[in-house]
Image: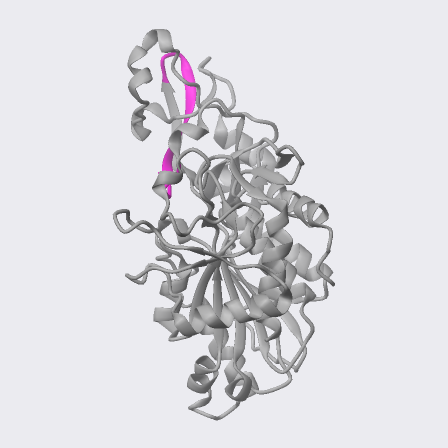
Amino acid sequence: MPIPTDELTLGDDLRAFVDASFSPSHAVAELARRLTAAGFTELAEVDRWELAPGAAHFVVRRGGSLIAFRVGTAPLSSSGMRLVGAHTDSPTFKVRPHSDVRQAGYRLVGVEPYGGALLHTWLDRELTVAGRVALRGGSTVLVRLPGGPLRLPSLAIHLDRSVREGLTLDPQRHLVPMWSRDLGSEPGLAEALAEAAGVDVADVLGHDLVLADTQPAARTGADGTWIAAPRLDDLACCHSGLTALLAAPAGERTQVLVCNDHEEVGSGSMQGARGSFLADVVARLVAVTDPGDPQALYQAVARSVLVSADMGHAVHPTRYDRHEPAHTPQLGGGPVLKLNANQAYATDALGGGWFAERCAEAGVPVQYFVSRADLPCGSTIGPLTATRLGIPTVDVGAPMLAMHSCRELASALDVSLMAGALGACLRD
């Protein structure tokens, strides 16, 4: 599957991917659908794996994380791996277990913030609930409520003129989305979830649900090359990583795409980057390709490289003073190589040089990002994965604006550039 050369075509494909991925579980389902269509087959962690050279598979853990791989023709101990990592979650709100809130004549849905969202951007939007519900008997099912049943209305300026000096939102009191009027007998969220799942209310025993903006991703900008969409951080890099993996030809090295959940809240889960998911899959790959060799795993890791792909900050058009003046990535300018003196990013000289060389071979420009010395820096799955596995790692991302907004902004031109860069890394 070659990488499309028409930037707008690939940008439209990213928009379709985002529109299908309302929650981490939906993102994994869409990744799995596309992988299956391309000939990858799903494996289960509970099964014994038999992997032939050139075989293409994927495995899912707890619904929100996925690892896909194409087995190389050479043992991992002699060739290593080329890996791309991204994450499936985005800042949002999670629905509470007891979510039925009634006050002031309204019925509301109890939620709490997930990750570092720009809270005010969620106001006055048509929102829905999406994710998975756990059913009696141990199964789960994906759900997304139709339409836009939820809303977080702003308070009129007439009732709070202090908003002109700055909006302050208390998540506990102010960010509880409306469901309906409280008439005493109308169906609530529980009934709607059961209907969406096709089961009785009593059969829904748990849920992992998030709020999602229902406005579809769109082309914008004077020339139509910008993409306005929710959840671009980090679904855009999941999409670029997938595009690169599907386009990469099989070779000696094993190629891996890992998309972890829970990055926005520190990755501390069995399916997050702090967990064992990637380490477990790598160990099993080595066990199959290098059976009986106790040193093979360590050799494979030492010969591998991970590209941690998470969205990066483009320079802001009116708040450019918040950027380091010599490092101002532009929308449409290509992948951003991230560096931080305090190791918030895992890039070092060798890794950064290796990535820049791969981009040069692919004809892809490289931009650089560092934080101002007087401002804190965010982080990614890169340092966590590098620390846990001991694998050389480089942190990169596609430039964007409005990161962690309910609706973010990126460039369709960067979709093909990022996919091309990641493809060159997988082919190295």
Name which residue lies at 55% across and 30% down: 192
Q: Quadrant of residue 22?
A: top right
Secondary structure that dominates the magenta span: strand
Q: Quadrant of residue 217?
A: top right
Name which residue lies at 50% across and 50% down: 234
Pick the front one: 2 or 5: 5
Pick the front one: 46 or 338: 338
Q: Is residue 223 above or below residue 188?
A: below
Q: Is residue 109 magenta?
A: yes
Judge left or right: residue 42 versus residue 99.
Answer: right
In percent of width and height, residue 365 lies at 57, 59
Q: Report the quarter where the N terminus lies.
A: bottom right
In percent of width and height, residue 272 lies at 41, 59
**Res 43 seen here:** no
**Res 302 seen here:** yes
The residue range painted magenta reads 103-117
Q: Is residue 106 above or below residue 141?
A: above
Judge left or right: residue 273 versus residue 225.
Answer: left
